[in-house]
Image: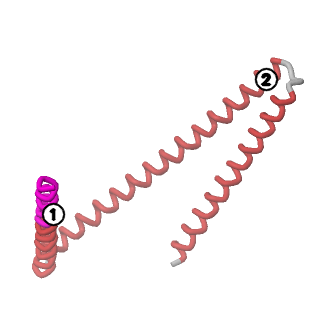
């Protein structure tokens, strides 16, 4: 329960930090736009502002890339966790025949549901096709 609370608070904090960052970027953009509208600055100042804007954009791209890499790391960890769970289930099912029988029944039911759903979709598609031809 505490772990879920921690994750919820951490995600809320991240969202607020991203929101604040976006607001700061907007304020800076607004200041730059006002400076350009005044037109009193020299071309050197305009180039310096453009350089600063490019640096901020590069920083934001770096942030997005780091978040993507963190997400990739999390997904790889989840994949290994689920792989471990699958191997543990296989191990338990081989040791206990009853569990193996239950897992086989679940797989059979799932495949049967898939076949039934596929047949229903095929029949509906066929009926739509026939209706389209007769119309």
Out of 16 and 103, give the one closest to the viewer: 16
Instruction: Read off the residue under disc 2.
Output: 46
User: Horizontal placement of 18 versus 42: left or right?
Assistant: left
Q: Main secondary structure of the magenta part?
A: helix
Q: Find numbered disc 1 in the image and state the secondary structure of the residue it sits on.
A: helix
Instruction: Read off the residue under disc 1.
Output: 124
CA separation in Å, label 2 and label 1: 64 Å
Which of the 4 quarters of the picture holds residue 82? bottom left
Q: Position of residue 133 (x, y in %)?
A: 12, 53
Q: Position of residue 88 (x, y in %)?
A: 24, 68
Q: Residue furthest top?
A: 43
Identified at 46% across, 51% down, the residue is 71
Q: Find numbered disc 2 in the image and state the secondary structure of the residue it sits on.
A: helix
Which of the 4 quarters of the picture holds residue 112? bottom left
* In the image, residue 134 lies in the stretch drawn in magenta: yes
**Image quarter in which the C terminus is found:** bottom left
User: Horizontal placement of 87 versus 48: left or right?
Assistant: left
| In the depicted structure, whether residue 27 falls above or below residue 44 | below
Identified at 40% across, 54% down, the residue is 75
Which mark is on residue 16?
none
Out of 127 and 112, give the one closest to the viewer: 127
Q: Which of pointers 2 and 1 indicates the residue nearer the eye?
A: 1
Which range of residues does the magenta coloring cover? 118-135
Circle 2 Cα neighbour tier, 10 Å, few/some/many (<14 / 14–19 / ≥20): some
User: Horizontal placement of 65 versus 111: left or right?
Assistant: right
Q: Position of residue 122 (x, y in %)?
A: 12, 60
User: Horizontal placement of 21 versus 82: left or right?
Assistant: right
Q: Position of residue 104 (x, y in %)?
A: 11, 73
Colouring mode (rainbow / by chain / secondary structure / one colour) = secondary structure
């Amino acid at each position: 329960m505490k772990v879920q609370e921690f994750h919820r608070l951490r995600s809320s904090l991240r969202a607020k930090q991203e929101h604040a960052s976006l607001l700061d970027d907007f304020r800076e953009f607004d200041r730059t736009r006002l400076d350009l509208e005044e037109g009193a600055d020299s071309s050197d100042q305009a180039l310096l502002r453009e350089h600063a804007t490019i640096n901020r954009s590069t920083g934001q791209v770096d942030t997005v890339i780091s978040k993507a890499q963190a997400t990739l790391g999390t997904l790889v960890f989840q994949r290994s966790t689920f792989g471990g769970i699958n191997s543990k289930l296989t191990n338990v099912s081989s040791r206990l025949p009853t569990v193996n029988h239950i897992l086989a029944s679940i797989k059979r039911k799932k495949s049967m549901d898939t076949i039934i759903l596929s047949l229903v979709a095929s029949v509906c598609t066929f009926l739509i096709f026939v209706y389209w031809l007769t119309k």
